[in-house]
Image: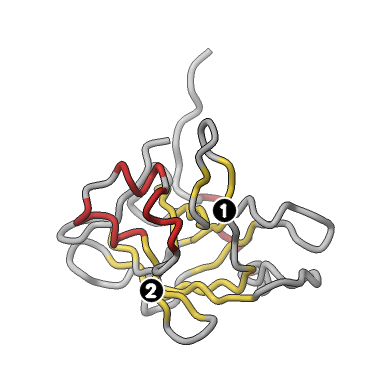
Amino acid sequence: MSATASQTIGPYWHLLEEPNWWDLTRFGATGEKIVLTGRITDGDDLPVSDACVELWQPDPPASPVWQGWGRAATDVHGVYRFVTLRPGPIPGAGNALQAPHVALTLLSRGLLKALFTRSYFDGDPRNADDPFLSSLDASRRETVIAQPEGSDVWRLDIRLQGEKETVFLDL
């Protein structure tokens, strides 16, 4: 059996037009609501204005009012925005807990394969013991740690290449 060819978001781009997919709380989920936003830029520090960003988080667990998944398009400035619930720690390998984070997938022009990264939250004491963060060189960790912009707004800018390129996972 041969592998299926990779494509950009292709025929499913119209799914970005669903106006509410960026709001993971839209079905009535309760908990600590936060906004995760940021700007996606290319290697020349220009905005990526046609990206699809998908967010998935395993905590809180899925339910009829909480799917734990959302999708957003970037605007002309390369900005994406999600409303979600603040995640808690999740089990990792063995008895290790992973620090609270969300998983992000990026699809865009010029990307033949999706890019995968994570967003952790600055100041969380569990970041120090997170297995993934601990595996990164200290100078690269900041590329996956969202910074606070107010009491319930977090910002993670994503750079696709060049200086301060975001750490992407090889999945």
The quarter holding residue 135 reads: top left
Report x, y in % for residue 63.
80, 55
- Label 2: which secondary element: strand
Q: Residue at x 52, y 45 (%)?
A: 97
Between discs 1 and 2, the one toward the N terminus: 1
Report x, y in % for residue 57.
60, 54
Which amino acid, mark 2?
Gln
The circle drawn on residue 89 is: 1
Q: Residue at x 48, y 55 (%)?
A: 104
142 left or right, relative to 126: left
Which amino acid, mark 1?
Pro
Q: Is residue 126 above or below residue 131?
A: below
Q: Residue at x 53, y 12 (%)?
A: 1
Residue at mark 2: 147
Q: Nearer the viewer, residue 59 or 76?
A: 59
Report x, y in % for residue 133.
35, 49
